[in-house]
Image (cartoon, grey):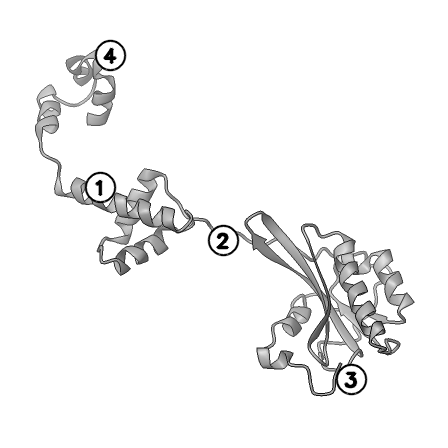
Amino acid sequence: MIAFIDENKARFGVEPICRELPIAPQTYYAAQSRPPSRRSVTDEESVVKIRKIHSENYAVYGVRKVHAQLKREGHPVARCTVERLMRREGLRGVRRSRGPKTTIPGPLADRPGDLVERQFTASAPDCLWVADITYIRTFTGWVYAAFVTDVFSRRVVGWQLSTSLHTDLALDALEMGIWTRQRAGRDLTELIHHSDRGVQYRAVRYTERLAEAAAVASVGSKGDSYDCQSVFTRSRKDWEVPAGVV
């Protein structure tokens, strides 16, 4: 009410406003002459530090991280106070949103069977490739990455980046894998290509390219969307190419 009176007293006067509000003019004048409270003083000190921390961290810090940074800098303040002051100042952090959906199921007709059945092992190079698409957040938006990995050597034989999930993203990664292996003189006639049920891998151009390379398509069963990702998240040691493998 004090702030409301301050904003409107030049237009309506203090006494007329007080007659409409449940406050006596003496209370308003007493509040004007009263020295700032200890809380208001500490709040202003905290706001200066909160604004500094928030701006120095690219305005991405929320209440939890701002509160933790204040403690590290030796400025003890309650978390609820940080939340209240950030709300008052209109400061907020960047929330981690859910990532985009990369697997949109393709049509059921003519879908290949699951030739792998979650047994991601191979006896030799170019016997089993797995393909998958993931996403990466950048300052300009989401970027999608398609990978084709040889299960035996854990080598990424083909990859491509794009800002869209069109078929060309997955197809370019496949083309790179086929080209690099054929250039090295590798035989792909025993190759099984395993992927999820995404429409990119069931597109006509993609399946035709597999057929041209004499590779056999395999599609994971429903509910095993993380099968291919498990191959890409092995430990660093697992990614070392065995001796003698090109």
Q: Amino acid at mark 4?
A: Arg
* Camera-side mark, 2 or 1: 1
Q: Name the residue tied to disc 4.
A: 11
Q: Is residue 190 left or right of residue 30?
A: right
Q: Residue furthest front?
A: 183
Q: Is residue 137 left or right of residue 124?
A: left
Q: Name the residue tied to disc 3.
A: 124
Quadrant in the picture for the N terminus: top left
Q: Amino acid at mark 1?
A: Glu
- Residue 12 lies in quadrant: top left
Q: Looking at the image, tell me whether mark 2 or mark 4 is earlier in sequence order.
A: 4
The reply to whether residue 218 is in sight is no
Give the Cα distance between marks 2 and 1.
Answer: 29 Å
Residue drawn at x 15%, y 14% as measured from the top left: 15
Q: Which mark is residue 96?
A: 2
Q: How many marks?
A: 4
Helix, strand or loop at disc 1?
helix
Give the Cα distance between marks 1 and 3.
Answer: 68 Å
- Answer few, some or many: residues within 10 Å of disc 4's Cα (few below 14, many 20 plus, some between 14 and 19): few
Residue drawn at x 71%, y 52% as measured from the top left: 165
Indicate the position of residue 59 as horizontal and vertical percent values: 41, 47
Q: Name the residue tied to disc 1.
A: 44
- Residue 198 lies in quadrant: bottom right
Q: Nearer the viewer, residue 27 or 37?
A: 37
Can you say whether 16 is above or below 98 in the image?
Answer: above
